[in-house]
Image (cartoon, grey):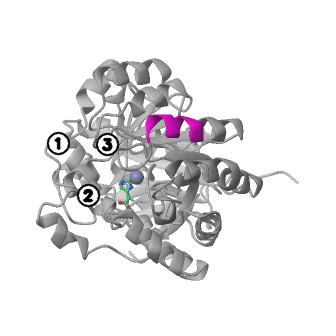
Amino acid sequence: MEVGLETTLLIKNAAQLVTSRGASEKPLTGKALGEIEVIEDGAVSVRGDNIMAVGTTEEVLRKAEITAETQVIDASGRVVLPGLIDPHTHVVFGGSREHELALKLQGVPYLEILARGGGILSSVRATRAAGREELVERGLKYCRQMLAQGTTTAEAKSGYGLSTGAEIKTLEAIGEIDAAQPLDLIPTFLGAHAVPEEYRESPDKYVDLVIEEMLPAVVERDLARYCDVFCEKGAFSVAQSRRILTAAKEMGLKLKIHADEIVPLGGAELAAELKAVSADHLLAVSDEGILRMAEAGVIAVLLPGTTFYLKEDHYAPARRMIAAGVPVSLATDFNPGSSPNNNLQPIINLACLYLRMTPAEVINAITINAAHAVGRGADIGSLEKGKKADIVLFDAPNYAYLAYRYGTNLVDKVIKKGKLVYGGEG
Ligand code: IZC
Ligand code: ZN
């Protein structure tokens, strides 16, 4: 039987359709990070899961095969972007940490709260106590919020279990959440998120457990694509991080690292040495670390929402990284402690205002470069023929408006794999 080429979904008359082009193989760097295609009176046609054509409304209508079944969305007064991608989240956790706000306002630092058995360890107690169904229910709620805010794919870390059983429970919950709703989750094993209380006196024994028991259990069950480590004072040293990440790489996982967030330990250099896909945070990155990341093509995933929420006095040196040729991406870092926000829209504002990135750079950072940071550059992150039809419509006259308005959800509609999954009523 001949397969038809009917258009199943047509989006037309967009005030602007905004996307990168031709960056599906490698993330954007340098000047190219600030270049983006803007099509006025833009349109996109979709068949099934896939984008068939992108261009002006006139160009796309010429190619599209419209039938009585074609769903047509009029995007007048809307900006159309690729679905947003959040490449760093801790979306599955038990409990919450609003009680720590008072401590924080008294000036107790984040790492001191952790050293006192609070912070991450407080979320670990709540996550261990929660059943898998409870974690799934909560994760589903957060994913519904994220989808409604324009995020169509997100990375999701474990790391609040810190025992083999509780880490597996978390990763299985991530798999279940992924399968049960439209937003795609890409799982990362973060067994080395903190040293659990029972190993406080023997942290290297915990590193042994991560390498000898947890990693093989995770890999055997095919529960994660990436392995990450919180390389930080009070968490894991560079030597411990190197041991864990090297073992993970040998077992076939790709690598990420929480690097140089608070104390400049040399996490960026380690990321380059091990050819990690990304190094994340980087407020305290050294000049040498920036150079090595650029040479090795390690993506910098910057998390300005966390910097804001921790009341840090300086942000990651985004402009220096861009000038050095480091591919830059952005994420929410959604987690119960240092970033209880799962919306990429305020990250657009923060990145422009405090990382001094342009709106075009920021959009590339949360679409195509974020796709590369989760290993999906070939099939998502831009509006191009053949890619998955993950599309978001914003109630905005132009894309700069997204960096200007603040605190209102501007998302009008979200399409995931060719299906309208949010905003169907209007
Ligand atoms: O729960 O505080 N930084 N991990 C590393 C976090 C923040 C999450 C948390
Ligand atoms: Zn994180």
Which tag, 1 or 3, sits closer to the chain's start? 3
Disc nearest the viewer among 2 and 1: 2
Q: Classify mark 1: helix, strand or loop.
A: helix
Residue 211 colored in magenta in the image: no
Q: Which amino acid lies under the numbered mark 1 shown in the image of this protein?
A: Tyr
Name the residue rendered at 28%, 66% in the picture. Answer: 409
In which image quadrant can residue 321 be found?
top left
Note whether residue 77 is visible. Answer: no
Which tag, 3 or 2, sits closer to the chain's start? 2
Which tag, 2 or 1, sits closer to the chain's start? 2
Q: Decide: few, some or many residues near mark 3? Use Cα within 10 Å; few <14, some 14-19, many ≥20.
A: many
Whole-percent x and y of residue 356? 18, 36
In the figure, 344 relative to 138: above or below?
above
Whole-percent x and y of residue 61? 51, 47
Report the residue marked by disc 1: 354
Q: Decide: few, some or many residues near mark 1? Use Cα within 10 Å; few <14, some 14-19, many ≥20.
A: some
Q: Classify mark 3: helix, strand or loop.
A: loop
Report the residue marked by disc 2: 112
Q: Classify mark 2: helix, strand or loop.
A: helix
Image disc number at residue 338: none
Report the residue marked by disc 3: 261
In the figure, 172 relative to 405: above or below?
below
